[in-house]
Amino acid sequence: MRQLLLVAVLCFQGTAFAQIHRMERRDSSQALITHELNPIVVTGTGHHQRLKTTATPVRVLSRQEIQEQGIATFDAALTRMMPQISMAPSSMGSFLRLNGLGNKYILILINGQKLSGDISNNVDLNRINMSRVKRIEVLDGAASSLYGSDAIAGVINIITDQPTQQLASVSSSTRLSAYGQLTEAATIDVYAKGFGSYTTYTHDRADSYQTTDKEYKKGSDTETQQTIAPLFTGYRSHLLSQRFTYSHDTHLALNAGIDYSYKITDRPDTRADIGGGTDYEMRYKGLRWNAGGIYKFSSRQSVQADFTVDRFRYGKEYDVETKDFHIGDYVQSKKQRSMEGELKAILHLFEPRGILASATTIIGAQWHRDFLKATSGNIDKNATTTAVYVQHEQKLLPQLTATIGARYTNHETFGNHFTPKATMMFSPGSFNFRLSYSAGFRAPGLDEIYYHYFSVNRGKPQIIFGNKDLKPEKSHYVALNAEYHTATIMASATAYINNINDMVVRDNINVDETTLAMLQGEFPEMTADQTSKLERYSLYSNSDRGLVKGLQINVSANISRHFNVSANYTYTHARTKSDGTWRILERSIRNAATLAANYHHTWGKYRLNVNVSSRMQSKTYYPDYEDAPGFGIWNLHTTHTFEHLKWVTVQPGIGIDNIFDRVDRRTDSSIRKYALYSPGRMLVATLKVNFKK
């Protein structure tokens, strides 16, 4: 009944609008009839190329695919369509994992510029404006030659939309489902005489929920008690974005933008009669601004400059009266700031001559400065990184392309590092065969070096120490890719090995009498009761190495003008070696697959789209705890587009998430870990309306 009421409310939102790009109108192209299997990408080689011709394989999620599945959030877009990526939501952000490796090894970019704002190595994905996403490009494996530190597991580059036609539009989209899940986005776009203004406001919210209200009593594996601790932490977030562009002529284009984000959790309050509540909410604020421009000497040669400042902070806002704090008090936990400047030239220095065909050379320089002030971790530090890089792509023969590149990085704490890259692509007919090698580099974060952290979570003390003797992590990534590509089908297989040396891990050390005395001296604020509950503390250290071996298989096909399918499978074997012992990397998943089938048809001014999608995965490994069981989730979404007026498009939608009601209802405990966070079957309703002149 509640779900039906939600749909009824949504259907009567006559003021809502939705954005449907002009190029996606029914009578303008075949984009809505068949999927684009050879899109333009930029992440793999640093310059725009067709996917089929890039020497470095890149996985692309288009706006069309995202809309067909009725997706409104960034994490849903990745996990529903990319099996090598998994997410674990929490009050501290989303724990993202790519090919067995966690957040700190994944570089997230927006139009090529780094997105800062990690929370305990988690990422606040609510800072990503999904209403502007044109496509999401994912590059697997080490990419430090072009992108520097943190790109050991791969790069996720979010490309946003910038209309350049004479237009003015106002639009909005709404997605509503059970458990208070609501996403609303409104946009205002104006473009005239080379000047563009693009304004977006997004509101996202969700209620906390449980899949079980029972937890084991401390020290017991059989006796349970009731708890109000949520599996999924509710939140409310707001994102306001403003972007300006100006194109003087075909040579010069300028841009500037600013994004403000605010998010606060919505957890159950502490209660005297039942455990699992909290005294405070986590509050996050972000402010990001950037400016840049590109000058094109010709259609093939250009120079571009970008400068970005990203500020992010979070802390505790109390909503329960305590001994030390009043309702409304705010205690800051961490404040981060990053500044980055980049100058890059894309050149064609050599004209085709003899057996040598066209060539592209990229030369760039980058400066990056990180600041971290963590009250809870007793840190106030900064670090500067400077780098220069070069990459040359040469077509040796009509069917043979080679790319070589290198980056020289100077980190003020960890010195100089050299990260090369080399790829070779052989393209006979409709086939591509690629062999690639790339080196990765990651400097330990300021928190990993300097942390001196003590907190209490649900009555349990947590202690984390940084380590000033850490060494930077280095990796070697080798991949072999085979691809078959036509206008109607794309199939590829990639086998890879990612070898990471001096991997930074957080060791859990059991407390004994000697260490307990040390910890009491380090944290005199720790009470006797908290001391009695302290079982272990954490210390950042270098393990011997990490090793990830994997296989990816991807197939996409346009079966007909109205029907297309895609299937993706990944096998990942991720391990780490410490003290001579190999162990599975925490949260890694051995087997995962995603499937999608889409049917669309147009009758006059009405268009129907039906999408069925699924994610299936084997168990998630937790070496020190109980493994989380595998699952299979199926979703159905339909959209109905009405174009009865030239200046307005209306697109209601309805669907079901988790059709077969798969839920992990295991009794909660201090050692219970999860992989499936769905509350069960949910009815989903969407409404998009777009006014455009």
Image (spheres, rainbow, N blue to C red):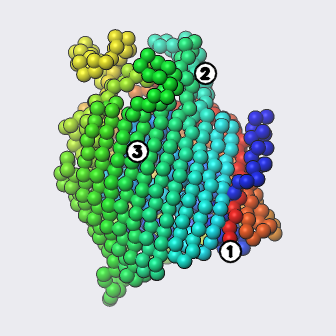
In the drawing, does residue 235 fall left or right of residue 169? left
Residue shown at 28% from the left, 41% from the top: 446
Please indicate, yes or no, whether residue 569 appears anywhere in the rendered image. no
- Characterize the local packing of mark 3: few (<14), some (14-19) or many (20 or more) Cα atoms within 10 angstroms: many
N-terminal-most mark, 1 or 2: 1
**For marks 2 and 3 on the same chain, the one whose residue lies earlier in the sequence:** 2
Q: How many angstroms separate mark 1 from mark 2 (CA)?
A: 53 Å
Q: Which residue is mark 3?
A: 312
Between discs 3 and 1, the one toward the N terminus = 1
Q: What residue type is disc 2 on?
A: Asp
Rendering coords of residue 25 (x, y %): 69, 69
**Which type of secondary structure does the marked residue at label 3 adopt?**
strand
Q: Is 226 in front, or is 666?
A: 226
Residue 440 vs residue 324, the one in the foreground: 324
- The quarter of the picture where residue 393 lies is bottom left
- The residue lying toward the viewer, choosing from 12 and 460, is 12
Residue drawn 49% across the image and 65% down it: 244
**In the rendered image, is residue 237 in sight?**
yes
Q: Is residue 60 depicted above or below 424 in this figure?
A: above
* Residue under the point 73% across and 63% down: 649
How crowded is the residue under tag 1: few (<14 C-alpha within 10 Å), some, or many (20+)?
Answer: few
Q: Nearer the viewer, mark 3 or mark 1?
A: 3
Q: Amino acid at mark 1?
A: Ser
Q: Secondary structure at mark 1?
A: loop
Q: CA distance from mark 3 to mark 1?
A: 42 Å
Residue 213 tag number: 2
